[in-house]
Image: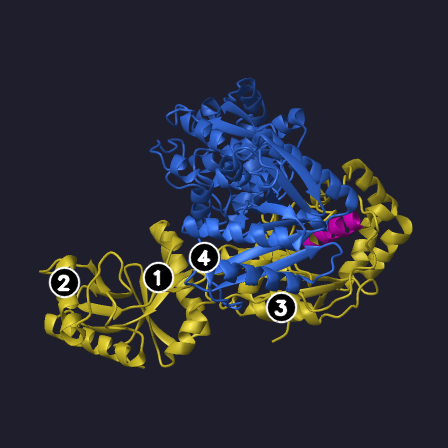
Chain colours: A blue, B yellow
């Protein structure tokens, strides 16, 4: 571990919160980082300084820690003109060797300063610029450089870097309470879950196994769970499954066929609410998007959400399928979701698109839905895996 | 109006819906376009052909029609080798003159074909490529061209173009039912409203005027309304305002100070639900994002949403402030939202962050909230403007 090569980690929204909240969020962020990365951490005025033996691995991991807005591997030295000059020159020579800085192309130096010094940020930028020219003869172009060198002076320490790598943003996971996420093997629900993890929520996934109306395989949802778990450092990501086939069978047999999808979704909310009680979860997440499929009309959303008194959060509700798919690719769940799968055999050819609440409640009574769902709950199975 | 210069308009998700739904969506899309653009339209197998006198204006307008995925200004001719050759060559010569095609740089031709022809798509691409070389001598590079020429052969008509301009995507506005949107002068709520308009919803905006706790000016919300209206061709975008100041005064005087924000939001949902009845609206939209401000904690969302039995859709719930601000800039509401404004003087220094439902209901009873909200409703004012 080289104490002169910290990674500077920047976090965003935490910075604007009240001192008490900020302290709590920072503490959680640092604890989440430490659980994933073998490292030492110091914190100084809105920046985390991370020291790790394996920088490459640490940087890959930082891309999966919510709350991290960006980070930069740096070389540090004491705030002393001679030392800064030497460090900058060594830094630049090293980059030229690696082919990361082409001295034929224009460069710029940007300096940021925290603390009291006998020089201005601009003077330090000019000083470092001259140091670079001395060893490279590279042209300067402040407005449109090909290469940017950053000097961050913090009190008696100065940090030199050239990369700002994007983190996932959001808030530290574990700062916002727990939610139940309805997750299928499809493209949407894993993205919805990811977005709420990103906003700091702990998650309990509930998956509905529709066997014999589907293949009944849990492989996809387990793979999705494992992918999402990569982003959950510092939080217990849980995965439950219930057997939903018998309930769906009852729906297809005893209710009007066009109602199956509405009853299915209503039942999911009701099961989720029951599990939420024991999980101390505060809300339900689903992957709904208005108008995407026939069963996701506004009237259907109204009629099904009525089944639960908990808030249902649908973070994809305003997004297009193409936008959701792009997010899924970025997260890494897309390639799992598109694995070949059997469609749900319980879905009718003409699903209800304009569900009327009274009618839905009437049918729910008729099929004794409460009793059926109690049976479903008995099949609750913790399939969390490593 | 040149009948040989149609704009090809592509629409996305509509294509995958059932024939009946598709027909309805296409009809609405065309009607929305015609309300905004003076044009003639024909439709052919999943493509709209738009003929307009003022192509530049038509293209600017198409960027504001939800449902439009992309569009291309084209030159068309009959599907006949001699005519296609001449049209392609004229097209390319014109682009060279305008500086839009540099014959020093590599190009490629891509052909798409619908219908039965005695040539393949590949043959036609080769034929047009040779025609281009004949007049430009430009080099060909199929894998990495600087310039792409598209040939779309549809039965006995052939279309030539080189641009694919992005539309806003989504679904035609007016295909999904009406919603009530809670819109303030801030950055978030206009973006939330835009996203649901984009998913095809008609919108009634309700704005809460908190005077004397704010400046009481309606200027910002009217400007936001006007900006959103640009995207609402074919839908009646409504704007109502209620005077909320007296109610807030009651909250600050008769309820525990830390509860003000929770009561304020609860009241908004209740007013929205009442207005929803007369507007035949099916859901409420707000700009909530978990954890963004102290009052948007999960417990608070739970406690406030309980006030309404309607579904509350929060399309920003999983997004970061930076992501929301970027969207606002793209839409054009950001510059309005950041106009200087007076913060809400009713907000307490330490707002409740962990609201308990029972306690909230108790306080609502104590301040006779129902009665107070009835008074608020009496101030309902339609401030829709042109």
Q: Disc 1 sits on a residue from what chain?
A: B
For residue B270: magenta?
yes
Pointer 3 with pointer 1, Cβ within 8 A: no
Pointer 4 with pointer 3, Cβ within 8 A: no
Ranked by sequence position, the earlier of labels 2 and 1 is: 1
Residue B35 to residue A354: above or below = below
Q: Please name the residue that numbered disc 2 is placed on.
A: B126
Ranked by sequence position, the earlier of labels 3 and 1 is: 1
Per the rendered image, the range of residues in magenta is: B261-272
Q: State how far apart marks 3 and 1 are (Cα).
A: 30 Å
Residue placed most toward the observer, A315 or B200? A315
Pointer 2 with pointer 3, Cβ within 8 A: no
Q: Please name the residue that numbered disc 3 is placed on.
A: B335
Residue A231 point in image, percent of width and height:
54, 35
Q: State how far apart marks 2 and 1 are (Cα).
A: 25 Å
Quarter in which the N terminus of chain B is drawn: bottom left
Q: Disc 4 sits on a residue from what chain?
A: B
Residue A329 point in image, percent of width and height:
42, 43
Q: Residues within 10 Å of mark 4 (few under 14, many from 20)?
A: many
Q: State how far apart marks 4 and 2 are (Cα).
A: 37 Å
Q: Residues within 10 Å of mark 2 (few under 14, many from 20)?
A: some
Q: State how far apart marks 4 and 3 are (Cα).
A: 26 Å
State the SS at label 4. Answer: loop
Q: Please name the residue that numbered disc 4 is placed on.
A: B171
Q: Disc 2 sits on a residue from what chain?
A: B
Q: Going 56% across and 63% down the picture, which residue do you hit?
A: A130
Could one spot residue A358 in this view of the protein? no
State the SS at label 1. Answer: strand
- Mark 4 vs mark 2, foreground winner is 2
Q: Disc 3 sits on a residue from what chain?
A: B
Q: Please name the residue that numbered disc 1 is placed on.
A: B10
């Amino acid at each position: 571990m080289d104490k002169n090569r910290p990674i500077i980690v920047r976090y965003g929204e935490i910075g604007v919160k009240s001192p008490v909240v900020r302290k709590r969020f920072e503490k959680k962020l640092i604890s989440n980082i430490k659980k994933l990365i073998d490292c030492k951490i110091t914190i100084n005025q809105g920046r985390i300084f991370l020291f790790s033996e394996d920088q490459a691995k640490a940087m890959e991991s930082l891309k999966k820690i919510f709350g991290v807005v960006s980070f930069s591997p740096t070389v540090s030295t004491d705030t002393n003109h001679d030392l800064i000059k030497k460090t900058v020159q060594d830094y630049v020579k090293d980059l030229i060797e690696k082919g990361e800085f082409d001295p034929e192309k224009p460069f710029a130096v940007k300096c940021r300063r925290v603390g009291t010094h006998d020089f201005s940020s601009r003077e330090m930028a000019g000083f470092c610029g001259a140091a670079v020219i001395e060893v490279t003869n590279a042209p300067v172009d402040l407005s449109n450089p090909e290469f940017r060198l950053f000097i961050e002076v913090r009190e008696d320490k100065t940090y030199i870097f050239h990369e700002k790598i994007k983190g996932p943003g959001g808030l530290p996971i574990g700062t916002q309470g727990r939610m139940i996420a309805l997750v299928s093997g499809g493209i949407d629900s894993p993205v919805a879950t990811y977005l709420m993890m990103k906003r700091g929520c702990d998650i309990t996934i509930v998956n509905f196994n529709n066997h014999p109306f589907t293949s009944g395989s849990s492989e996809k949802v387990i793979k999705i769970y494992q992918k999402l778990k990569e982003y959950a450092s510092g939080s217990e990501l849980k995965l439950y499954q219930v057997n939903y086939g018998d309930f769906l069978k009852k729906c297809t047999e005893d209710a009007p066929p066009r109602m199956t999808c509405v009853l299915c979704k209503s039942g999911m909310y009701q099961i989720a609410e029951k599990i939420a009680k024991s999980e101390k979860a505060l809300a339900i997440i689903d992957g709904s998007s208005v108008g995407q499929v026939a069963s996701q009309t506004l009237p259907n959303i109204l009629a099904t959400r009525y089944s639960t008194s908990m808030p249902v959060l649908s973070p994809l509700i305003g997004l297009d399928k193409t936008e959701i798919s792009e997010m899924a690719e970025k997260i890494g769940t897309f390639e799992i979701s598109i694995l070949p799968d059997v469609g749900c055999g319980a879905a009718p050819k003409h699903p209800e698109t304009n569900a009327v609440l009274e009618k839905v409640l009437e049918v729910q009574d008729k099929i004794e839905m409460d009793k059926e769902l109690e049976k479903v709950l008995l099949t609750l199975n913790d399939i969390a895996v490593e």
